[in-house]
Image: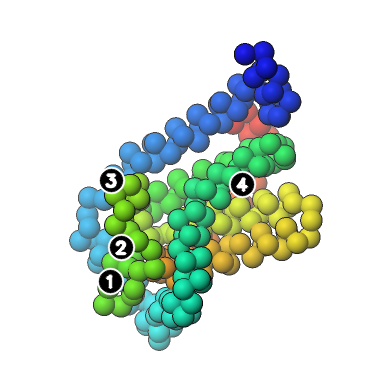
Amino acid sequence: MTTVVAAGRRILPRGWTDFAGQLAIWFGFYFAYLGARSLADRNPAQAFWNGWRVITFEQRTTHDVVETTTQSIATSSHWLLTAAAWTYWNSEFTVVGLALLWVYLRHNDRFIRFRNTVLLANIIGLVGYITWPTAPPWMYPSLFTSGVNHSNGLLAALANPYAAMPSLHSADALIVAFFLVSACKHWWAKVLWALWPVWVWFCVLATANHFLLDVLAGIAVGIVSLWTVRKAARAYPIIASLL
């Protein structure tokens, strides 16, 4: 036990108690998210109708469906399509989780703002899923081809099938890029993380998991979350430091 405590003091910036508290906040939010998500699954007819409205809006404004263009690019290469699929499944929980852990361990002074920004973006997204459930492009097989296997039992159970608007993949990728570009020291790492959200935006379109309008809404959610948390931290620094 003494060895474990000593290791925690050496590796963890604020010790095991704070680390456990951060895990409790993160997993507590996740399970609350799963519970609230069930509210968004109750009206599939409305979700499909909202999806058609998005398609119609894009066709009127762009005279094309942008998603089909990105899909044709991705399907031209098996490697590119596989990379896009892996990015879709891992960009949200794996990359966000590892990014939060790295910032917590190496740049702890930035962690609270990073965590709060991600949480706020996901809360906004959840409100969107409940009030505006939207079927993703892959549910319209006459127009789009899915680049991701959605039939896996575990993945199907964890995923919200009508959570296209807004795209939290897009929002979280932008937030991760913002904090990691500022935290990384090497120029090449900054460049890679600056390109990360652009790659994620391409992947969610190429795999038919989000419409262009979903991506734009996700970008807006990310920007609003970054701005709100920054303003709140400046206006209420004591409260922000305790969260």
Alpha-carbon neighbours of circle 4 within 10 Å: few (<14), some, or many (≥20)?
some
User: CB of mark 4 within 8 Å of CB of mark 2?
Assistant: no
At numbered mark 3, what does the secondary structure look like: helix, strand or loop? helix
Identity of the residue drawn at 72% across and 39% down = 106
Identity of the residue drawn at 68% across and 29% down = 12
The image's mark for residue 99 is 4
Q: Position of residue 220 (x, y in %)?
A: 52, 60
The residues bearing labels 3 and 1 have C-alpha atoms spaced at a distance of 22 Å
7 displayed left or right of 44:
right
For marks 2 and 3, the one nearer the N-term is 3
Which amino acid type is shown beneath numbered disc 2? Answer: Ala
Above or below for 18 versus 201: above
For marks 4 and 2, the one nearer the N-term is 4
Identity of the residue drawn at 44% across and 32% down = 28
* Residue labelled with disc 3: 39
100 displayed left or right of 152:
right
* Residue labelled with disc 1: 140
Alpha-carbon neighbours of circle 1 within 10 Å: few (<14), some, or many (≥20)?
some
For marks 3 and 1, the one nearer the N-term is 3
Alpha-carbon neighbours of circle 3 within 10 Å: few (<14), some, or many (≥20)?
some
For marks 1 and 4, the one nearer the N-term is 4
At numbered mark 1, what does the secondary structure look like: helix, strand or loop? loop
Which amino acid type is shown beneath numbered disc 1? Answer: Tyr
Identity of the residue drawn at 26% across and 77% down = 142
Can residue 130 be seen in this snapshot? Answer: no
Can residue 2 be seen in this snapshot? Answer: yes
Of marks 3 and 1, the one in the foreground: 1
Q: Position of residue 32 (x, y in %)?
A: 39, 36
Q: Position of residue 20 (x, y in %)?
A: 56, 26
